[in-house]
Amino acid sequence: MKMPNILTEPSSEPDADWAFDAFDRRDRTLDGQFIGAVKTTGIYCKPSCPARRPLRKNVAFFWRVEDARAAGYRACMRCKPDEVGRDREAIIAALKSIEEAEHTMSLEDLAAAVNYAPHHFHRLFKRDTGVTPAAYARSLQAKRAAAALDNEGTVTQAIYAAGYSGPSRFYANTKGHLGMTPSAWKNGGAGVEIRWAVVDTILGKMLLAATATGICRLSFDEDETALQRRFPNADIMFGGSALEHLITGAIAAIENPAQMPDLPLDVAGTVFQQAIWNELKRIPAGETRTYADIAAAVGSPNAVRAAGSANGANNVAVLIPCHRVIRSDGTLGGYAYGLERKQALLDKERAQERLL
C-alpha cells in the first residue's frame, strides 16, 4: 500500500486505507504523523493508542491535532496524543543542545533543559532517534574527529579540535566508531591489516573483508581493488584462518537467513546512518519495509531520501539487510548488487518463513 507523501500533501486528509491499516496495527512509528478520530465518541487518538479499535466506518483521519479539534473532537485521555508533539520538540531541542555544547552534557542536564525526568527522557530519546543521548554525543564527536583527522596537521591537534579533553578520551570513545587507530584513519589505513577473500555462494561470488575488529566489507562481484580504493595504505592481505569462521557465518546468513548468525562488524557512519542500519537489522527475515517506514521508525518521517541514502551507504550486505527495504509502491527500488540478487534474497527468506 502506498504511503501518502506528507511533504507534498500536508493540507489533504491522510489516505484512509493506509491510515486505518497503521491505526489497526497500533503503529508506534507513526505517532505524531497523523491521528484517528472516532465519530461515535468524539475522541481523537494517536495510532498506537491501546484502546479497543472502533469500526472502520466510524473513524476519520487528520494530519494534525488542530484539525481534529476544529472538527469538534477532543484528545484521548488514555494515549494523550497532544503530548507527542511536545516530545518531538523536546528531542529536537536536546539534539541542538548536544550539537552546540562545548563539552558532553549529562543526561540529567539534558533532561532538565527540556523539563523531563531523566529516565523518561532517556527512553523517549532512544525511541525517536534509535540511540541513547550518550551514544549520539559520542557518535557526533567521533564524526568530528574523523573530519578533523582529515584536515588537522597532527593527530593531537585533531583530537582537541574535535572537542575531546585529551588523547585518552579520544581513543576510548572512537575505537568502535573508526574501527582503527586515529593515525591509521588519517593515513588511509596505514598500519591496519585487512584480510579478504572471495568465495562462491548461491548468489554468486562474495567478497568478505575484515579487520581485527570485525567485517568491514561484504559485497558481491567485487575484489580487493574496492578495498584498496578505500584504504590505499592499509596492509591488505588475502585469506587467513581468522576469516574462516566469518566466511562460514556469512554463507550461513545467505543460505539460512531465518537464523542470522551474530558476527562482529567494523562499520562506521553518522548517527543517522547508524540508526538506519540498526533499524534494518530489526526487520525480520521474510518481511520488508519501505524507505518511509524506516525513516519513520528512527523518528525522522520526512527524511525518506536520507534513509534511502543511508541504506545505500551500507558496506555489509546481507548482515545489515538493506535488501529488505523496498519502495512504497511495492517495487524493489534499488540494490547495489542488482535487483535479481535482491529478489533472490527476498524469495529465499520468504520460502524459509513458510516452512517454519
Image: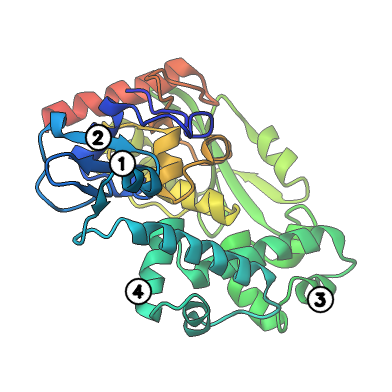
Locate residue 67, reporting x and y percent: 38, 43
> Which residue is outermost to the right?
153
The residue identified by callout 2 is: 60
354 or 40: which is nearer to us? Answer: 40
Q: Amino acid at mark 4?
A: His
**C-alpha distance separating marks 4 and 3:** 38 Å
Chain-order first, disc 1 or disc 3: 1
Chain-order first, disc 2 or disc 3: 2
178 or 151: which is nearer to us? Answer: 151
Locate residue 153, reporting x and y percent: 90, 66
**C-alpha distance separating marks 2 and 3:** 60 Å
Q: Is residue 99 something one can see in this rendering? A: yes
The residue identified by callout 3 is: 156
Q: Identify the secondary structure beneath mark 4.
A: helix
The residue identified by callout 4 is: 120
**C-alpha distance separating marks 4 and 1:** 32 Å
Q: Amino acid at mark 3?
A: Thr
Locate residue 95, reporting x and y percent: 57, 65
**C-alpha distance separating marks 1 and 3:** 61 Å
Density class for disc 4 (Cα within 10 Å; few <14, some 14-19, many ≥20) is: few
Q: Nearer the viewer, mark 2 or mark 3?
A: 2
Q: Residue 71's mark?
A: 1
**Apparent side of residue 19 relative to residue 339 in the rendered image (left or right):** left
Q: Nearer the viewer, mark 1 or mark 3?
A: 1
Q: Is residue 350 above or below residue 102?
A: above
